[in-house]
Image: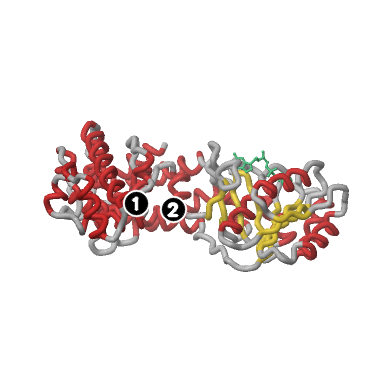
Amino acid sequence: LGSSLKNSVRKIVKKGRIDKETVNELATDIQRALLKSDVDVELVQELTDKIKDRALNEEPPKGASSREHVIRIVYEEMLEIVGEETEVPMEEQDIMLVGLQGSGKTTTAAKLANYFQKKGLKPGLICGDTFRPGAYNQLKELSQRIDSVFYGEKESEDAIQVVKNGLNELKDSKVRIVDTAGRHSLESDLIDEMEQINEVVEPDKKFLVIDASIGKGVKDQANSFNEAIGIDGVIITKLDGTAKGGGALTAVSEAETNIAFLGTGEKLNELEEFEPDSFISRLLGMGDIEKLAQRAEERLSEEEMDMESMMKGDITLKDVYNQLESINKLGPLNQIMSMIPGGFNLPDDALDVTKEKMQIYKIIMDSMTEEEMKNPQKINSSRVERIAKGSGTTRESVNELLKYHKMMKKVMKQMKGGRTPMKKMMKKF
Ligand code: GDP
Ligand code: MG
């Protein structure tokens, strides 16, 4: 599907002009991709109607190709549905998690505690689930794992009282996270309980936790939770599975809220702040290749990065220097690589090169002679010493750069062996 969407995008490039037939074809492919990702049928229909209308009636801005224009429209309309990223305030706050049984509330509660702790805000976890046996132990065990304060009452059946006590006990915690009992369906007593906990906590944020694989029924759920307590954001869990999370978009649109976080695994550090771009790519099943192509065309000039000549063989430190500059403009290397279909087997270290490291590498290279830049293999240990001193860095950093250069050389060779030169791929896709 992703590939058929790519094909229809490619057709737009070939035709150079957008006609009704091309747009219809693109719309159909988008529909297929989104339905496969469990996005609600009505949402999909609305979206593609808008895309068709805009693609056919809006003039591309000056200088933009028809393809860029259409891609922009698709992206903007997708963003409309998916929503912008949610600002997570780094301040004292109370958070309440609600959702169906098994959706991942308890796990997410601990993940959030871990998240805020890493940001320097002392978390406190409160077990407001007195319904399910084992809920107490589960949250307690999780909180021990991340060294977070925990409050719960193992024998109590009065969730409202437990939460009240918990809030009193955990006054020192900056971010207090209340886990609640899951609902199988929307039984009225549990909804009552949730409403009462809501009144006791008066949470700053009420997150609805939703399993990525949710399909039918999400509308009713979202509405019930939203009517009962008002939802401030959605957390989609289990995105590490096959489900793309499109079903959760219905909840987002019904509750008129945004996605706040994504759960991407069972481990407690597998929680991501929501970021629309990659989520959109995922829903469309086509990678970020278009975005990359666009950015590449906009910003990658020939002088900055001559991939072809590099791939012919010799890559010097000068090339590495230019390459680092280009990468700085494009984004982190791992992001770039993940956008390329098929992918290359990059060594893990290559992906570790952070912006800060690149900055250091550049400072080091500024202290090298032209000759050293051209023939880095001639840099012996006394030269390493001199370069480190001259650049005010360390021998380790210099050696690391030399290692990086060697690795890039290998990578370039690997690409040369491949069928599609990277540059061509970036431009033509
Ligand atoms: P609750 O009933 O809503 O509190 O759900 P739990 O937090 O107990 O989670 C139910 C199951 O889903 C547990 O086995 C969790 O380990 C698992 N789970 C939760 N979040 C994720 C996630 O992001 N990815 C994966 N793979 N599993 C998850
Ligand atoms: Mg639970």
Residue ID at (38%, 47%): 352
Q: Is residue 320 above or below residue 32?
A: below
Is 174 on the left or on the right of 50, as rendered?
right
Q: What is the number of the mark on residue 242?
A: none
Ligand 1 closer than 8 Å to label 2 CB: no
Residue 57 in percent (x, y) is at: 34, 59
Q: Nearer the viewer, residue 266 or 204?
A: 266
Residue ID at (66%, 62%): 175
Residue 10 in percent (x, y) is at: 29, 43
Kindly indicate whether the residue at mark 1 contacts the one at mark 2 (C-beta within 8 angstroms): yes
Residue 425 in percent (x, y) is at: 25, 42
Quarter of the rendering containing residue 377? top left
Q: Is residue 217 above or below residue 164?
A: above
Mark 1, residue position: 291
Mark pair 2, 1: CA separation = 9 Å
State which tag comes first along the sequence, 2 or 1.
2
Residue ID at (36%, 42%): 349
* Quarter of the figure that contains the N terminus: top left
Residue ID at (46%, 40%): 32
* Quarter of the figure that contains the C terminus: top left
Mark 2, residue position: 277
Q: Residue furthest front?
A: 382
Is 259 on the left or on the right of 50, as rendered?
right
Q: Is residue 173 above or below residue 159?
A: below
Quarter of the rendering containing residue 223? bottom right
Q: Residues within 10 Å of mark 1 (few under 14, many from 20)?
A: some
Quadrant in which ligand 1 is drawn? top right
Q: Secondary structure at mark 1?
A: helix
Tell me which amino acid carries mark 2.
Answer: Asp
Q: Secondary structure at mark 2?
A: helix
Res. 144 in view: yes
Res. 66 in view: no
